[in-house]
């Protein structure tokens, strides 16, 4: 038995599920008009659009998703360049961020495409994907080296969202999400001060590191607020376990026994120095790292934890808005980290 919908047209057909041709014939329009109603409704007159959409609803037409992707040229892939882990560090690909990014993009019908590039060329790999239209958009994560990718992609009108603020251009017009590193090291320093340490040292990265300098400001702000002198307490070193171990020995010789570090790699180096001196972490000396890596969790290293899962969710939300043509927010989104206290800095009761 055949029934009719609001348009007065049949809602089903014994010949099988309705097709685009079915909708066109019932609405009295061309197949292209039906396609425009689905993909470019702004091209149709309001009365024509309403008639076609009503027929679609009445007959229960569902467009073939694969065919629509071919017609629109959309790959439903998001490109993400990943960097290899450096030897001598605890830092690897951000597993928590990547896992949530994959899960969240999947919910929106997209998938993440990982690609690599020359470590000395932050733009390597992007051009090939753009030329082949292999991805719909990009997620940029390596903003620690500045954001040349942002300007390059904007010039080519390629959609993207950055995890990391545009350090070279505070007024950048693209969408981005970042974590407040300064707030994290401020929490870490305040924690050590509350544990009774009045000389808290800083182990950071080279001055050229924008992220490292941002984290350094949190340590310095907490010390200044407590009225404590930071002269001779801040060292800039490479992000390497052995470099941190040697720097820790240098400061321990000056009777400094509390450390805030720019990374867990450096925190692990400090812990090794404690062991070499026969010092008990959390009792004779204390250290806090940054990133809450698996190494920190296994060894009992207190660490600043970035909300990477929330970052990924926010990035995907901005990607959806960007792909829909929405303008970037006037300001980037900065999320607040937390402090995970473990035995490396917590005095026993």
Image (spheres, rainbow, N blue to C red):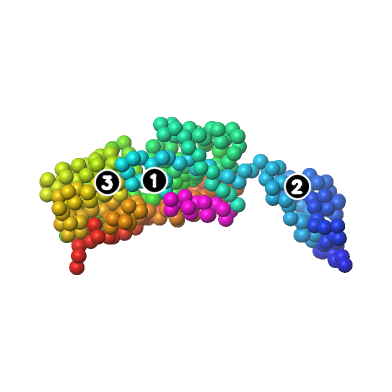
The residue to which callout 2 is attached is 35
Can you give x and y, in whole percent of width and height, for residue 280 in the image?
A: 17, 57
Tag 2 secondary structure: helix
Asked if marks 1 and 2 touch (Cβ < 8 Å), the reply is no
64 relative to 12 in the view: left or right:
left
Q: Which of marks 1 and 2 is in front?
A: 1
Residue at (86, 51) in percent of width and height: 25
Residue at (37, 53) in percent of width and height: 306
Neighbours of disc 3 within 10 Å: few (<14), some (14-19), many (20+): many
The residue to which callout 1 is attached is 92
Asked if marks 1 and 3 touch (Cβ < 8 Å), the reply is no
Going from N to C along the chain, the mark reached first, 2 or 3, is 2
The residue to which callout 3 is attached is 266
Residue at (24, 47) in percent of width and height: 269
The label shown at residue 338 is none
Task: Please state the extent of the stretch shown in magenta in the rendering.
Answer: 95-108
Tag 3 secondary structure: helix
Going from N to C along the chain, the mark reached first, 1 or 3, is 1
Tag 1 secondary structure: loop
């Amino acid at each position: 038995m055949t029934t009719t919908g609001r348009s007065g047209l049949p809602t089903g057909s014994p010949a099988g599920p309705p097709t685009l041709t079915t909708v066109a014939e019932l609405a009295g329009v061309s197949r292209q008009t039906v396609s425009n109603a689905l993909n470019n409704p702004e091209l149709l007159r309001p009365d024509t659009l309403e008639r076609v959409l009503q027929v679609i609803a009445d007959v229960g037409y569902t467009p073939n998703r694969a065919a629509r992707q071919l017609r629109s040229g959309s790959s439903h892939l998001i490109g993400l360049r990943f960097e290899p882990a450096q030897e001598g560090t605890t830092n690897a690909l951000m597993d928590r961020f990547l896992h949530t990014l994959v899960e969240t993009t999947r919910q929106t019908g997209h998938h993440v495409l990982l690609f690599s590039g020359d470590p000395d060329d932050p733009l390597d790999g992007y051009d090939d994907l753009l030329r082949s239209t292999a991805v719909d958009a990009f997620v940029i994560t390596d903003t620690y080296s500045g954001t040349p990718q942002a300007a390059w992609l904007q010039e080519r009108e390629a959609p993207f969202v950055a995890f990391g603020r545009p350090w070279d251009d505070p007024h950048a017009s693209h969408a981005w999400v970042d974590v407040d590193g300064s707030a994290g090291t401020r929490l870490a320093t305040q924690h050590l001060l509350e544990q009774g340490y009045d000389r808290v040292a800083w182990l950071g990265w080279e001055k050229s590191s924008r992220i490292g300098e941002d984290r350094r400001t949190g340590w310095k702000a907490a010390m200044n607020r407590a009225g404590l002198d930071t002269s001779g307490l801040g060292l800039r070193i490479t992000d390497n376990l052995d470099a941190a171990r040697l720097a820790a020995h240098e400061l321990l010789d000056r009777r400094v026994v509390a450390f805030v570090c720019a990374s867990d790699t450096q925190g692990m180096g400090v812990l090794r120095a404690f062991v070499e001196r026969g010092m008990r972490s959390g009792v004779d000396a204390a250290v806090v790292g940054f990133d809450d890596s698996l190494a920190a969790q296994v060894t009992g290293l207190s660490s600043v934890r970035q909300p990477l899962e929330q970052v990924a969710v926010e990035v995907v939300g901005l990607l959806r808005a960007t792909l829909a043509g929405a303008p970037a927010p006037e300001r980037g989104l900065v999320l607040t980290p937390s402090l995970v206290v473990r035995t490396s800095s917590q005095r026993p009761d």
